[in-house]
Image (spheres, rainbow, N blue to C red):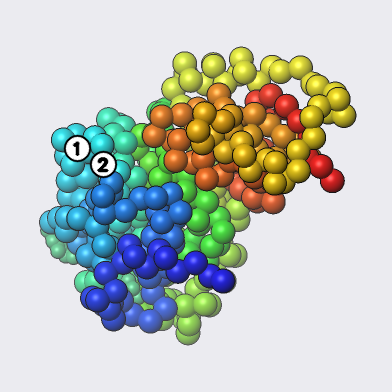
Amino acid sequence: MIDRSYKELLKLNRYPHTWCPGCGIGAVLKNVAMVMKELGWNHQNTTVVSGIGCSGRMAGYMNLDGVHTPHGRAITAAEAIKTVRPDLNVLVLSGDGDLGAIGGNHLLHTSRRNPDITIFCNDNEIYGLTGGQAGPTTPKGTKTVTSPGGEHYEPLRFNRLLTMKPPYFYARTTVYHLHHFQTCIREALLYKGFSFVDIISDCIELNGRRLGFKTAHQMFKWFDERFHIVEGVREHLADDELGIARKDTEVEARVEVEVREKPEVEIESLKSFSLEELTQFDGGQGQPIYIGYKGKVFDLSASPLFQGEKRMRCHLAGKDLTKDLNVAPHGDDLIFKFPVIGRLKE
Ligand SMILES: Cc1ncc(C[n+]2csc(CCOP(=O)(O)OP(=O)(O)O)c2C)c(N)n1
Ligand code: SF4
């Protein structure tokens, strides 16, 4: 049965919402709510901020305390909240125009200070709310209300702007690549520091139709042609890649290299675990954190991915994650450097 408990995080009493049928914003809201629910983020521990625009209406539909700021000021408000209430998870849900044009200066300088906030940018490559004018991420040559002969300038590339200097976390995904989209949301929420998810999305009414698309689905297929998923965590993403670009500071990176040099072990000589036995090792009540992968059992108790606040990731532990890791952008990079302590029973 489909778990619809994420709906607790939405103000359904305010529905029907304001967005056009087929608009990608609904998918952004829904998927962020689904992953938040999975991680236990709610009105007691999380607040949300939006700026102005169709995308900027998202905060108003979340069942959380939130702020609807003046145009371009969402990130400043979010940083201020995090500064005075470091115990709260702070999210920004807004559009490419709000975050990258009028709010561009705040994006630049807040990312430099690296506060622990997460930005979800509904990047529909247009100003939707005001009628379809060219925005900062509108591709060169696109016909819009303000560029009837084709947009003149090269677009702003968030990936290049936000991955200049570590530490950073930048992910690009689309509303069409759902599994990838949810992975990016999850990893961004769990990242300790400034994380930015650039979600390529559609404004079917005020951009798509002018480009000749009859339906939102046609636009989604176009995203699939323009972008492709890259596996693993990269240092940088090319302009047509969907994935996660992440780099920690030099000191953290060195520690990782040292841990990687582990000798191989004879797997047959190790204890074997059934899937049921594995469930006991989920990090709860002083238990270690074990994860199954391709027939082996890894001990991830020392992994920074599960320390401190990230302990909430323990819902992943005590399971065979082979299928999930095979499709996740980080692949098996996350676990192979930790000790193999057992094998999975056939
Ligand atoms: C100070 C100020 N300048 C301009 C506007 C007009 N305005 C409202 S929303 C918007 C663009 C929003 O674009 P984006 O963030 O991409 O959101 P979308 O509507 O596409 O989701 C503009 C220019 C405004 N509200 N306030
Ligand atoms: S105008 Fe565009 S961005 Fe705004 S709700 Fe409609 S489809 Fe979505």
Kindly identify the residue that appears in the image at 60 percent across and 53 percent down. Answer: 229
Image coordinates of residue 123 in percent, x first then y, are: 38, 59
Q: Where is residue 27 in the image (x, y as percent from the top left)?
A: 42, 68
Q: Position of residue 125 (x, y in %)?
A: 37, 63
Badge 1 crowding class, 10 Å Cα cut-off, few under 14, some 14 to 19, many 20 or more, is: few
Q: What residue sits 31% from the left and 32% below the top? A: 114
Residue for point 47% across, 16% down: 251
What residue is rendered at 80% in x and 35% in y? 272
Cα separation between marks 1 and 2:
6 Å
Q: Relative to 201, is 16 above or below?
A: below
213 or 333: nearer the eye? 333
SS for tag 1? loop
Q: Please tell me which residue lies in front, 100 or 335.
A: 335
Q: What residue type is labelled 2?
A: Leu
Q: In which quarter of the image is residue 12?
A: bottom left
- Name, please, the residue furthest toward the bottom: 214
Residue identified by numbered label 1:
85
Image vertical order of residue 26 relative to residue 160, above or below: below
- Dots 1, 2 in contact, CB < 8 A: yes
Q: In this view, does 141 lie to the left or right of 108?
A: right
Nearer-the-camera pick, 180 or 346:
346
Which residue is farthest left? 70
Could you tell me if residue 94 is visible in this image?
yes
The residue to which callout 2 is attached is 88
The label number, if any, that marks residue 253 in the structure image: none
> The residue under label 1 is which amino acid type?
Arg
User: On the picture, is 167 further left or further right than 13?
Assistant: right
- Name the quarter where the N terminus is drawn: bottom right
Horizontal side, residue 225 vs residue 111: left or right: right
